[in-house]
């Protein structure tokens, strides 16, 4: 009994420490640091050797968005698979057509921009450490839905890295990682859509989300892809406006 009480007390102490860290407010880094982190994120998206690694983060978010949308629209979620070629699949059951299926299919390509914009709002409020812990919670929820070994390794690896950073790293490193993840989500979100548009006539895109949406709605797949691209670019612009206040207005004034 004494050992159980000691364990419960230790667990309570750790939990209180996590909560205190998660709700604490951290000052935003200097604008120069934020822009440097944005440049690093852009390189991680644009450099071909790095992109497959970066795209894993987008795939996790993409498939997670499918899963959340499936549950919210009343479908039954059967699991998520992540593959070594950076692709993924979300398995659900329910009506093969109708609003629920449309919402679930549309959510994937919108997921990274939506999560990136939400992360930008948290960073603007000074909650960089809170963002890391929130991402950990989301990964834990995603973990129980993973249905293949590679996907399990990816989620456990990313989760372990976030735990180490959230618990052991200095506040400066924690803030930098939170900004880097957010920038990657925002900057990378349009790229898979651009790739989908460029390869729209390739046989591999026949089963894409846009192609399935076209079959359900009679709206062309290219129109769906264009909608995804506009939404992702809008998410990037909105995210920039919160991460670097005033920058968008300055760029607009310079362009004018």
Image: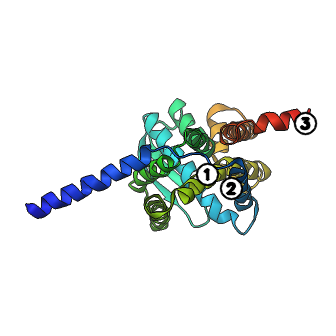
Residue linked to disc 2: 37
Residue linked to disc 3: 255
Q: At 37% across and 47% down in the image, what residue appears?
A: 19
Q: Is residue 129 above or below residue 233?
A: below
- For this orientation, the residue located farthest to the left is 1
Image disc number at residue 179: 1
Label 2 to label 1, Cα distance in Å? Answer: 7 Å
Q: At 77% across and 51% down in the image, what residue appears?
A: 201
| Residue 102, image quadrant | top right
- Viewer-proximal residue among 159 and 133: 133
Image marks 2 and 1: residues in contact by CB distance under 8 Å: yes
Residue 4 in the figure: left or right of residue 171 = left
Q: In which quarter of the image is the C terminus?
A: top right
Image marks 3 and 2: residues in contact by CB distance under 8 Å: no
Residue 106 in the figure: left or right of residue 148 = right
Sequence-earlier tag: 3 or 2: 2
The location of residue 234, given as percent across then percent down, is 71, 36
The location of residue 100, given as percent across then percent down, is 50, 33
The location of residue 71, given as percent across then percent down, is 43, 39
Label 3 to label 1, Cα distance in Å? Answer: 27 Å
- Viewer-proximal residue among 152 and 206: 152
Q: Provide the secondary structure element on which disc 1 rests.
A: helix
Say few, some or many: other residues with alpha carbon within 10 Å of mark 1 (under 14 / 14 to 19 / 20 or more).
many
Q: Provide the secondary structure element on which disc 3 rests.
A: helix
Q: In this view, does 197 lie above or below 125?
A: below
- Viewer-proximal residue among 111 and 13: 13
């Amino acid at each position: 009994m004494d050992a159980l009480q000691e364990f419960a007390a230790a667990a309570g102490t750790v939990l209180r420490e996590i909560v205190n860290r998660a709700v604490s407010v951290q000052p935003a880094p200097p604008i120069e640091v934020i822009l440097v982190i944005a440049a690093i994120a852009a390189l991680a998206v644009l450099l071909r050797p790095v992109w497959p690694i970066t795209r894993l983060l987008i795939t996790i978010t993409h498939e997670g968005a499918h899963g959340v949308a499936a549950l919210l629209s009343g479908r039954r979620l059967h699991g998520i698979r992540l593959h070594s070629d950076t692709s993924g699949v979300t398995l659900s059951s329910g009506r093969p057509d109708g609003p629920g299926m449309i919402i679930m299919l549309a959510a994937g390509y919108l997921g990274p921009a939506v999560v990136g914009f939400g992360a930008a709002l948290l960073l603007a409020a000074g909650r960089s450490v809170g963002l890391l812990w929130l991402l950990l919670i989301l990964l834990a929820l995603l973990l129980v839905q993973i249905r293949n070994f590679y996907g399990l390794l990816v989620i456990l690896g990313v989760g372990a890295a976030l735990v180490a950073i959230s618990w052991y790293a200095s506040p400066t490193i924690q803030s930098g990682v939170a900004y880097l993840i957010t920038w990657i989500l925002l900057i990378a979100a349009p790229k898979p859509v651009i790739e989908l548009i460029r390869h729209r006539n390739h046989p591999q895109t026949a089963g894409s989300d846009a192609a399935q949406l076209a079959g359900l709605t009679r709206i062309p797949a290219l129109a769906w892809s264009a909608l995804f691209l506009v939404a992702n670019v809008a998410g990037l612009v909105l995210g920039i406006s919160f991460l670097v206040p005033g920058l968008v207005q300055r760029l607009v004034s310079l362009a004018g």
